[in-house]
Image (spheres, grey):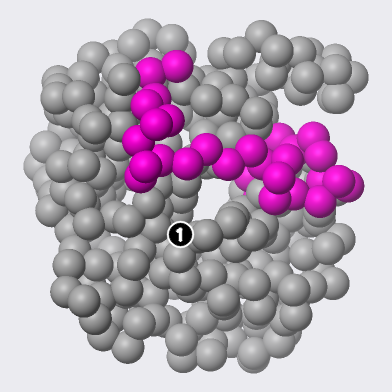
Amino acid sequence: MKSDTPSIDLVYLWVDGNDPEWQAKRNAFFGRKVENSSSNFNGRYVNNDELKFSLRSVERYAPWIRKVFIVTDNQKPKWLDISNPKIQIIDQNDILPEKSLPCFNSNVLEHFLYKIPNLSEHFLLSNDDMFFNKTVLPTTFFAKDGFPIIRLNRKPFRRFRWFLREQIFKKPHKLYSKALFNAAELVKQKFGVFYNGLPHHNLDSYLKSDCLRVAEHIFKNEIDLTKMNHFRSANDIQRIVYSYVALAEKRGHLQYVSNDESLHIHIQKDRHFEKLKKFNPTFFCMNDTEYADDNDRMKLKVWLSTRFAEKSEFEK
């Protein structure tokens, strides 16, 4: 990396949903065993070792990453070599306020990532089911002016479609969709523009100082109202708010994605694996949904073991 290129860190959110202690804590807080639903389904938390293969993709295609921070709930992967100086485990209890604990809601946790000690100003955020598929450079994520390249899926007439679904067809929105819409509405009220584009559900780039400014100043009151949402809730504000603000303030560069750049795979759909082979994108996400079962997860693990067969420096 050239000396004038900023240091870039990578942040993962990771949980081992197979851990009996973690399951007991979640169920105890919820007051009963958590049912499999669209907002709290098994696949949202189950550990299928995706992180191991995602890190293999990092070593292969983005070796210039300065440091990898893995934000967890007092857990760590058994296979991870935490003595590697590029790896640092961050307990979410160390960055979340007391009133947010325990936290089983990534929408809340993502509003505090800027508090990670020693996190670089320029950073990438990933879930453990997101992968590099080709060689990428710092300029893949940040433009020459240092501002993030903001990748979105083009969704024209989103506000109108939201109105139709809610007011005309009386169909309830999923909590994820509500969190996205809440973010877009906040930016519309503050800056006068409604962004129709939706997350491409893959690696995203941010400036730490911008995240701090949005969370502690621009939308402090609104974000504060969501901090006690221990599970996903209707008034959550999704982290897309940081990207929308960056666009509104001309501190980010909008780039709509196509299938040959970013592909979102549902692991239970065989035809999606065919799409991956056809388009060969730069990034892909292997999304576990409420419709996937353990057979689908086993099939995914076999596929990933073949696609990223060589151990990385991050493994014991």
The answer to which image quadrant residue 80 occupies is: top left
Task: Give the left or right position of residue 23, taking residue 28 as reference.
Answer: left
Q: Please tell me whether residue 143 is drawn above or below residue 19 in the rendered image.
A: below
- Say which residue appears at 70% left-offset and 50% top-offset: 95
Residue 154 is a magenta residue: no
Q: Please tell me whether residue 140 is drawn above or below residue 82 in the rendered image.
A: below
Nearer the observer, 292 or 217: 217
Residue 79 is a magenta residue: yes
Residue 290 at x, y percent in the picture: 54, 25
Q: Is residue 300 visible?
A: yes
- Say which residue appears at 59% left-offset and 71% top-offset: 211
Nearer the observer, 194 or 139: 139
Q: How many residues crowd around disc 1 within 10 Å: few (fewer than 14), some, or many (20 or more)?
A: some
Q: Is residue 238 visible?
A: no
- Magenta stretch? 78-107
- Say which residue appears at 67% left-offset and 41% top-offset: 92
Residue type at numbered disc 1: Pro
Nearer the observer, 41 or 101: 101
Q: Please tell me whether residue 152 is drawn above or below residue 174 in the rendered image.
A: below
Residue 129 at x, y percent in the picture: 39, 36
Task: Give the left or right position of residue 129, taking residue 190 as reference.
Answer: left
- For disc 1, the marked residue is 199
Nearer the observer, 5 or 303: 5
Q: Please tell me whether residue 164 is drawn above or below residue 194 in the rendered image.
A: above
Residue 41 at x, y percent in the picture: 61, 25
